[in-house]
Image (cartoon, grey):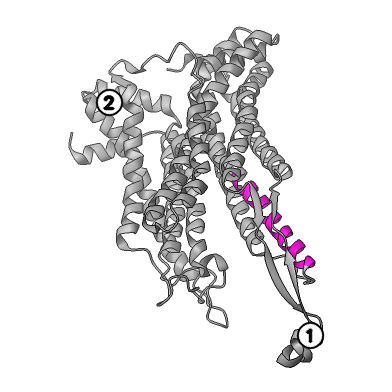
Amino acid sequence: MRPATLVRLALAGSRTDTARVVLTALSALLATLAGLAALTVLAIERPAGDAWVESEQYRNALLREPGLRGGTAFALLMLMIPVLALAGQCARLGAPARDRRLAAIRLAGATPGQVTRLAVLETGMAALLGTLVGLGAYLVGREVLHRPDAQGRLALPTDVLPSPAAVAAVVLGLPVVAALATALMLRTVTMSPLGVSRKAARERGPGPWAGLLIGLGLASFLAVRPAAYQLRGRDELLGWLVPLLFAVGALAAMIGVVIGTGWISYHCGRLLRRHARRPAALLAAGRLMADPWAGSRTFAALLAALIFGGGAAAQRAYFATEDQLDREQNRLVGVDAGADPFYLSTMDLVDAAVAVAVLIATGGLIVALVEGIVARRRAYAALVATGVPRATLSRSVAWQALAPAVPAILLALTVGTLLSRGLFGEVSTGVSSTEICEATAALCDDPATREQYTRIVYTPEIQRAVAVPLEQLAWLGAGALAAVLVTVGVGLLFLRASTALDELRMT
């Protein structure tokens, strides 16, 4: 098959295929913007001399202070996770119709390898289109947002650019990753002239192996402080060991929570089948047990955002406790210092990033639920034809979404909180002494009189446990549950059209 023919067939299809390509390109665009923003923060050059000198050309302290740029870039990269998960959900949109189109191409004489390359090329081209548009939007936004204030300081790092190699890695790497992911998903698919078939699903439920991954993630975070204490003075070793522990711990915990949702879905189905008495719950139980991994695929982006949100909530509680302890010590020595808003205002930006991630994940939930309803429309139409009310099917869809969602949300928030508390479980201060001059400014400034009005105040060592941020975690859980409910509501709008009896006559 000639390359031109391959490209033409990849661009062909129905309106559903067009929607899939557009949504995939949009996801790649958002991921490109997040990746380039993170690379731009890391590309800020440090002033000559001391490596920790602040870059005074920026108004925001997150950009001025070198020690905070790594965390800012990490938060931006975390936004790529729900975006990439959204891309994965969009790639499944209209899968049955695409399978029939691929089978027709096989019937016309294409080989299985050519059909696989066709599907891979479609996803890769859509992602490449999105990354190129994202690069253009980044360059245009860089010029538009370059507005120094009266002191010449910038709100954003629009005066620097990532290296060409880094930009090329993002713009070209994301389409390659998308194409490889498509090829990986198609490894169990057999495309024949008579249709598309997949390997049979597992007959038994998932095992509780996800708990081992979650335990590995927690152990990695708990090992950071002991490793830093044991390796004091060995900066070269700490420079790669600590980031490795962070990366391994976060990735293991995230994968464990996502995989664990499959185990949760299966056992929720078992409980519903054993104790439910209404048809809607029984239908949902059968579906949850038949495909327990659907919950892992559907909620992956949302759970990743909640893990990050739970960690951010615990981090905010640590900063609040530290600030409160500092103010108490200042009062002991007679200094009335107000709260330091820097770290807490920084956490406001992190919370905004979590909110954006949850919003993006909600889009992925909607796509996944609608795709599942449309893909099973003939089964739903058959149930309606046998006398099952549409209201029962609606409640079944709600049960199927909410039953695994509630425990999965609780698990994600708990794991995120425990990861952060493994590092910042308590606040401690050492013994200190402060000289206080209790006189007028003139007497205190005069060396001859200062000593007779000066007293030394000692502050004891204090250790205080950081409180669990139950209120913020409750708000995060409520927001995630509201996102699931909105998703169910949008999906039910498509259910009536998908249960029309005409669907039984469609191929």
Q: Mark 2 falls on what kind of element?
A: helix
Q: Is residue 504 visible?
A: yes
- Quadrant position of the C terminus in the picture: top left
Q: Is residue 188 above or below residue 311?
A: above
Residue denoted by label 2? 105
Question: Residue at point 60% right, 30% down?
Answer: 408
Q: Is residue 281 left or right of residue 177?
A: right
Disc 1 residue type (three-letter) = Gln
Question: For this view, does 18 lie left or right of residue 68?
Answer: left
Residue at 46% from the left image edge and 17% from the top image edge:
506
The span picked out in magenta is 311-332
Query: In the image, 161: left or right of 484?
Result: left
Q: Give yes or no for residue 217 being in the magenta stretch.
A: no
Are there few (<14), some (14-19), or many (20+) residues within 10 Å of tag 1?
few
Look at the numbered disc 1 and give the secondary structure of its residue. helix
Horizontally, is 472 left or right of 356 in the view? right
Quarter holding the N terminus is top left
> What is the quadrant of residue 493 in the picture?
top right
**Sequence-first disc among 2 and 1:** 2
What predominant SS class does the magenta segment belong to?
helix
Residue at image location 50% in from the left, 76% down from the top? 57
Comparing marks 2 and 1, which lies closer to the viewer? 1
Q: In this view of the protein, which residue sits in the foreground, 71 or 493?
A: 71
Type of amino acid at the residue the image marks with label 2: Ile
Quickly name the residue at label 1.
Answer: 452
Question: x, y percentage for residue 292?
Answer: 52, 20
